[in-house]
Amino acid sequence: MFGASLRRGFLLCLSSNSTIPNPSPFPNPPLLLPLTSLRFLSARSSEEEGSPTVVSLLVDSLGFSPETALSVFMKLQNKNPRNADSVIRFLKSRDFSAGQISEMVQRFPGILGLNANRTLLPKLEFFQSKGLSQSDLAKSLSHPHILCRSLERSIIPNFNFFRNLLKSDRKALQSIIRASRPGDHKITVVPNLKYLLDNGVSESNVAFILQYRPGMLYASLARLSEAMSVLKGLGVDPQKTAFLHALSAVLGMSKSSWESKVRVYRNWGWSEEECLSAFRKFPQCMIASEDKINWVMSFFVDRMGWKPSLIAERPVLLAHSFEKRIIPRAAVLQFLLSTGLIGKRYSLVPFLTMSEEVFMKRIAKYPEIAPATYWKILGEDFKMVGIFRTLKFIPRWIPDNLCLQNLCFWSMVAVNSYVSLSSFVALLIGCCGSCVETVEADLDEYCVVE
């Protein structure tokens, strides 16, 4: 079994005189503020002015807007990196696209100060020698912090450590890259692994953390133990899969952020126990941004007329994309209800939570709504603009061959997405080349408007 070999493998890495402190649990952690004793990092801000050379380079070479380029520049420790141009040219020569390079630079501006041939090339060659293709390499390095680590002192030792545990070059590479900013595995990872296993975390959960969430293992042992104490106090079972998300949420969230999100839920009518129960069921509900929480709760409570307790009982609803799933599917269901194609007692909850495959099969029973091709578009390419900034949601993509006789679905999406019909009509005229009278006539005939 992998779990048994995992335990044997990493215990061999422990030196005979290694000692693991036995941290004390939280004394009576407060009900709503279980992160009280965690340590938190403070953010720094810079007030320096931008360099025209670097900003211009980012705009001209990578297509950054002046504002984005200036924002990236402000994060540079060295405000005049001599290597910026050579780094960009080097990455392009290694078949990184402009989009991939842009993402790397925005995530880790310090890459612009690295030496392309002396620092970047040996690391890329090492990754490729262990089985990462060029395309995989470009995807993996969307979090490029590992490129600032020493190849000999950090990357190779950490790779060998994860390789011994995971028994795969590819998995080991993915782990050290996902860890972003790994430290010395002997100082952090080994003690943390032992602590997790000794405190009841299942071996399958530890194996998952090793491969997919290795960054958690580089937290200090004190912080990890405090987070574990919080989760134990909340009754989160370390044998369950939900524990992984709960631990990630607690380790990655500041005290002030936790308190603020609790206040948001309380403002929507959740009780203290409902907040904690929702976290135990679906820890990701505390990872969602406050904007998303407010949008989802507003839609379900104000728009759909649900009781807040219903969302608390099904916090998984907060995981779904507001623009790709909640709005379109709610619009579809409302259309089916309004036309009598389904009964009034049909619940939106299973309609939202069913998989895309099941949803498509279910909707295929109702050809009255739209052609099958439109449903494929809905599942894959439906986008909206300004989802968290404005109430005016306008579909970004409308098929070129849109048939006005099938506008019922698209207009329902518009109406239920707070788009004004005038804006929607204008959009259709621009996309389809139809006249105002034709569009309005078809809307009157085929659309259900509140």
Image: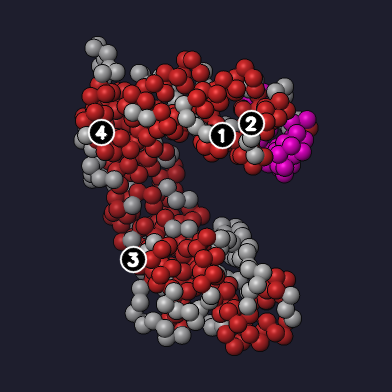
State which tag comes first along the sequence, 3 or 2: 2
Q: Marks 4 and 1, Cα distance to the nearest angstrom? A: 30 Å
Q: Which residues are magenta?
A: 53-79
Which residue sits at x=36%, y=57%? 316
Do callouts 1 and 2 mark residues in contact (Cβ within 8 Å)?
Answer: yes
Q: Which mark is residue 310?
A: 3
In the figure, is residue 436 to the left or right of 100? right
Q: Given the image, on which type of amino acid does mark 1 rest?
A: Gln
State which tag comes first along the sequence, 2 or 4: 4
In the figure, is residue 363 to the left or right of 280? right
Determine if residue 76 is in view: no
Do callouts 1 and 3 mark residues in contact (Cβ within 8 Å)?
Answer: no
State which tag comes first along the sequence, 1 or 3: 1
In the figure, is residue 11 to the left or right of 326? left
The residue labelled by disc 4 is: 2
Q: Which mark is residue 94?
A: 2
- Is-magenta flag for residue 381? no
Classify 104 as above or below 282. Answer: above
